[in-house]
Amino acid sequence: MTWFRRIALFQTLRPSPVGRCSLAVGAGGLMLAVAAQAGAPSAEGSEGIDKAVGPWRWATTLSATRATPALRANPPSAWPELLTLAQQAAGNRAAQAGAQAAQALSDQARATAWMPRVDATASALRTHQSVNDVNVSTPTRTATLTATLPLWRAADRASARAQAQQAEQAQWQARLSQTTVAQDLSLAYLNAVEAAEQRRLTQAQQSLLEEQLGINERRLNAGAGTILDVLETRTRVDQSRAQVQDLSTRLASQRLVIERLTGQPALPPTGLRPLGTALPEVVPPLADALSQAASRNPQRQESDAQARAAANIAQARQAERWQPTLDAVATLQHNRQVQQFNGLSDEQNVSSRTVGLQLNWPLFTGGQQGGRVREAAALLTQAQARQDEAQAQVDASLRDAYQTLAQAHAVIAVQQEVERSASATFEAVRKAFVAGMRTNLDLLNAQQQIYTARQSLVTARINGLAAQVNILALLDQLDAAHVAPFVPLMDDTP
């Protein structure tokens, strides 16, 4: 292709200066939005693009090696939807790529140990010699076809089994990464729910305190109250404002964690719905959970695969040290040689076929194989110790999570009674305060007891949900389907 044709083709394929194409993702899926680059766009076209793209417009660059997640028109706020988005987190993609690389290495090792190999070689040489002042030129061309079939390679086959176990280990590592991301996201979501609900309670308490402050100021102006009542109430108001600010900061931090794990701007929850039903339980009993963890927990399965891989590597090192390798070899070769001297030529065409067995037995390696055997034995011991540690850690984490869940249920029942008692006490103190039999400080303390009980109740409910999240993560069941029963507890109203 000439340069003129290349320039013409470039002019044909170059984007028009009138408009440019950008990819945007809205609620309906992937849409191609064409935005005018020069000149004023039409009103109909601008409205269509704005409705399709939404307020979160992203300039997307197409790449064959890296996929960039597209922003959604409506930021997600539901817990199951966030878990679905977290599956494409950067850590999950990296772990999955590592698992694919490990599987490719396993295929290579299996091919080396079991599959035949055919090689073709060709060479062209020219040799110049001088014999008794006679120049001799010898061009030589050689073509060879060699086939090798592994008959007995104990070390390579043990290494292939070890590589297969390492590929399985990488798969469980990828699954462990997904579970860890889902767990971090769920705990951040629950922390955001708790912060939002605590802030809402604190704001309600602040409103009552400001109302009480107005009452005390009017009583002071009427000569029925004291400046101490006003100062006590104003101090409580300032404290509630500071607490609201701290909770807002905590909520913003958790929202940033959610956005980092999902790759999307997310709406923070507004709190918990009023307590109408008991806290739902989606986890099995402790005995069933312990038995399920033995076959489903990613950490335990990953350590088991590592132990099996280390055992196969130890077998491979022993085989390398003592056992020979045996291959069947077949060779087909054609050699064409022409000798030229004193104007004469002598052409020789030689074809040869070779079939046989090739035995390789290491007799002395200078201590290299002994060191490899000791290394494999040490790695096997390390893998077995890590396997025991993973089993003990998973069992302890499960028992602790179930203990936290039981304690949360007990605290919820107690705090509900405390809230009812505190509410009754507050009504009695308020009537006594109006009658002049109780002080302003008694009224403020009674009101504080109500909100302290409500805040403790919120914390207990969140602790119960967090305990179930940890249990589901340990059982490799933390997904959108299992957290769906918790959704009615959340208040996702914008």
Image (cartoon, rainbow, N blue to C red):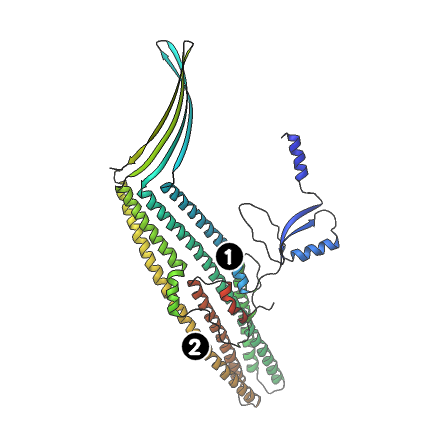
Q: In this image, 372 relative to 198: left or right?
A: left
Q: In this image, 10 relative to 464: left or right?
A: right
3D distance between C-alphas at marks 1 and 2: 35 Å
The mark total stands at 2
In the rendered view, would you say 65 is above or below 256? above
Q: Counting residues from the N terminus, which is met first, the one under dot 1 or under dot 2?
A: 1
| Quadrant, the N terminus | top right
Q: In this image, 271 relative to 316: left or right?
A: right
Q: Which residue is nearer to you in this view: 226 or 359?
A: 359
Q: Which residue is nearer to you in this view: 477 or 429?
A: 477
Which residue is painted at 48% across and 60% down in the image? 182
How many residues crowd around disc 2 within 10 Å: few (fewer than 14), some, or many (20 or more)? few
Q: Give how far across and how far down residue 279 sits, in percent.
A: 48, 74
- The residue that disc 1 covers is 87
How many residues crowd around disc 1 within 10 Å: few (fewer than 14), some, or many (20 or more)? some
Which residue is painted at 39% across and 63% down in the image? 293
Depth-wise, is mark 1 or mark 2 nearer the camera? 1
- The residue that disc 2 covers is 410
The local secondary structure at tag 2 comes to helix
Task: Give amino acid for label 1.
Answer: Gln
Q: Give how far across and how far down residue 144 sits, in percent.
A: 40, 28
Circle number at residue 452: none
The local secondary structure at tag 1 comes to loop
| Quadrant, the C terminus | bottom right
Which residue is painted at 69% across and 50% down in the image? 35
Q: Give how far across and how far down residue 127 sits, in percent.
A: 40, 18
Task: Give amino acid for label 2.
Answer: Ala
Which residue is painted at 74% across and 48% down in the image? 39
Q: Give how far across and how far down residue 415 sits, in percent.
A: 47, 79
